[in-house]
Structure formats: structure tokens, C-alpha cells
Image (cartoon, rainbow, N blue to C red):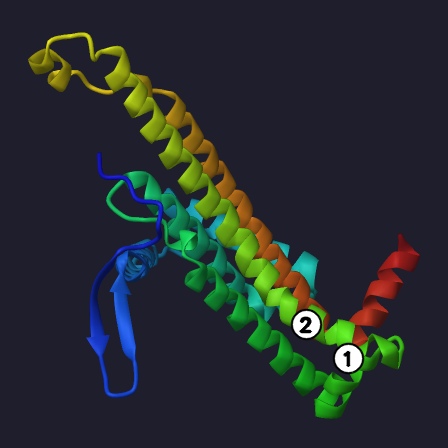
Amino acid sequence: MDISISGPKVYFAIHTPWFSINITQTTFTLLFVSLAVIITAYFLTRKLDKRKPKGLQIVVEKAVGMLYNLVESTMGKHNIRFAPYIGTLFISSVCCTLIGMTGLFRSATADLSVTLAWALATTAIVWYSKIKNFGLKGFLKGFTEPVVVMTPMNIVSEIAQPLSMAFRHFGNVAGGSVLTTLIYAALSLLSHAVFSWLPEAIAACMPPIFTAGLPAVMSIYFDLFSGFVQAFVFSLLTMIYIGEANPPPLEEKNESKKEEKSN
């Protein structure tokens, strides 16, 4: 029984005079998922019928429309340009988690370096947006609000933001993977112990029957259900943080006030 909960295996390393790069299971998973998503996107958009859409095209257009509506309702119409980024994060997260159910790949989101890279990318967009919209002086002044004495806490909060996003996503996926693996190992040992009274030749051919059922159910919860939930939460937090860094222009504020009065 080959079970490992120590993290992604390192297949080989690329050494340079300045640093070394480890090529791990996560690296191959990310490359495979990226290639699969690109190929899928190509075939889904290869022959689009603008006049009479049908079949899979209707499903894809509905999904894209839902994404843009979600971004608009959460971040505002002026931030609709971030919809492709949010969609990419969600699809990458879901695919990198669900691929672990195949047994051929390890879930990439069970590697902290992946979720941390996504969180840092979001933080970079937030900081760039704040500096662009409020200026460097306004960005730095934001750390002193509402009172100057809160500056250290605001700095810690700004640093903790990407860390909390990364660890939340990683912890749920990795924790579920470790728990499922440990239960599978325990049930395998139980099966071996129960049938140890049989002749050795027969016991060796007996499958670990106690592993049937419970690990599969747990995998459905931790990989399928939790995978979608964590991808949505990560994307939602990204929309909230980027939306706060890109407030609506004055015209959009006035329009929203008019709509509220009319309602």
C-alpha cells in the first residue's frame, strides 16, 4: 500500500548557478490542467453560431452570462473587465481540485504554493488599483485610517489578507485529502486483520473490502462539494477585495441613487 501525506513528490530538479527549481507532482498537474482547459476552450468556441446557438453553445453562453452577472452585481458594472480573471481563478481552482479524484494526479490546490500564488496575484491587482485610483500618497494614507494608532494593525491586516486566502483554500483541500488517505489506510489494515485467519494464499488475493464506500463518499464531499465551495469563496473574496480597490465612478453612484429612489 503506497500512501503518502507528506506533500507532492519531487520528480527532478533543474539547477542553475543561482537557484534550483523542483519539478513536482503539482507542476505536472498544473501543466495538464492548463493544457486541458485551453484545448476545451478552443473546441467550445471553434464554431459559434451567432444567429441560432444550440446545444453546448447555449450552456457555455449561459455560464459566461452568469459569471458576468455575478461580477457586475458584486463589483459593479465598472469592474466588469475583471470577469475573465475571476472566471480563470474559479475554473483553475475547481479543475486543480477535482483532478485529484482521478487517482492519476495530485490535487494542485493541496499545495500551498499554488493557492498562495493566486492570492498574491490578487493582492498585486488590489495594490496596483489602489495606487492608480488614489495615488501613492492616498494608498499609504489608507494605513493610518481611521486613526494613526491603527497603522500597525492595518499593515498586519494587509499582509494577512493574501495569507488567509491561501491557507483557507489550501487547508480545506489538503486536510480533506489527508483525512481521506488516513481513513483508507485504516480500513485497509482492518480488512487485512479481519481476514488474517484465512490461509495466506487466499488472504493475499482478498481485496480490502472495508475500503469500499466510506472513502468514496468522503472523496465526493472533500473533493467535489468542498472543491466547488472553496473555489467560489476564493473567487468571491477576490471580487470583494478588487471591488473595494476600484470604487464606482461618480456617474455610476448617481445612477444607483436614482434607481434606489425610483424603487
- Left or right, 94 with respect to 13, comes to right
| x, y percent for residue 127 | 63, 79
Q: Amino acid at mark 1?
A: Phe
Q: Amino acid at mark 2?
A: Glu
Q: Secondary structure at mark 1?
A: helix
* 242 is higher (above) or lower (below) than 144: above
| x, y percent for residue 247 | 74, 73
* 20 is higher (above) or lower (below) than 56: below
- Numbered badge on residue 158: 2
Judging by the rendered image, the residue that carries numbered circle 1 is: 143
Residue at image location 41% in from the left, 41% down from the top: 177
Count of numbered badges drawn on the protein? 2
Residue at image location 89% in from the left, 52% down from the top: 263
Residue at image location 27% in from the left, 61% down from the top: 24
Mark 1 neighbour density, 10 Å: few (under 14) some (14–19) many (20 or more): many
For the N terminus, the quadrant is top left
Contact between marks 2 and 1 (CB within 8 A): the answer is yes
The quarter of the displayed image where residue 38 is located: bottom left
Compare residues 81 and 111 and report the one nearer the observer.
111
| x, y percent for residue 215 | 38, 27
Mark 2 neighbour density, 10 Å: few (under 14) some (14–19) many (20 or more): some
* 68 is higher (above) or lower (below) than 223: below
* 40 is higher (above) or lower (below) than 159: above
Residue 78 appears in the picture as rendered: no
